[in-house]
Amino acid sequence: MLRVYILIIVLGLVGGVVYGGYYYYKDTQARIATLTENSVKLEQATKTQKQTIETLVADAKKFEELNRELNIKLDKANDYKNTLIAKLHKHNLTKLSIKKPGLVEKKINRGTKKLFESFEKLSGVKSSTAVTVPK
């Protein structure tokens, strides 16, 4: 009878070890599957981040170049402004307009027309009404 009890105990221990091994195997496989999925997600996130960084770097270079061009244009505009200011200081428009009002009026009207056309060209707006300037 003692042999039967020892046999039952040995079978119980062996069964417990086998069940523990089986449970450990299943748990490990589930963890491996989860870690594999997480690894794939992380790789995709890394690729997306690299693409985003490359895009940001390219945009930064592009904006830097555009900023340089704008600064050059601003310098040219400031030089032109200074030239115009110098011309206005050189000529006495009040005295000239009293002596030759027709000449000054024509020049001012032509300059105003050119200025408005320049604004329209820069803004991309087509004039719906034609501005007539007397000659």
Image (tube, rainbow, N blue to C red):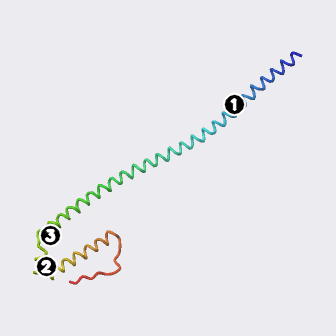
Q: CA distance from mark 1 to mark 2?
A: 102 Å
Badge nearest the viewer, 1 or 3: 3
Q: Which residue is mark 1?
A: 24
Disc on the earlier residue, 1 or 2: 1
Q: Amino acid at mark 1?
A: Tyr
Q: Amino acid at mark 2?
A: Ser
Q: Which residue is mark 3?
A: 88
**What is the x, y in percent for residue 110?**
22, 77
**What is the x, y in percent for residue 100?**
12, 81
Outermost residue to the bottom: 134
Disc on the earlier residue, 1 or 3: 1
Residue at image point 35% right, 54% down: 63
- Label 3 secondary element: helix
- Label 2 secondary element: helix
**What is the x, y in percent for residue 120?**
32, 72
Q: Are marks 3 and 2 in contact (CB under 8 Å)?
A: no
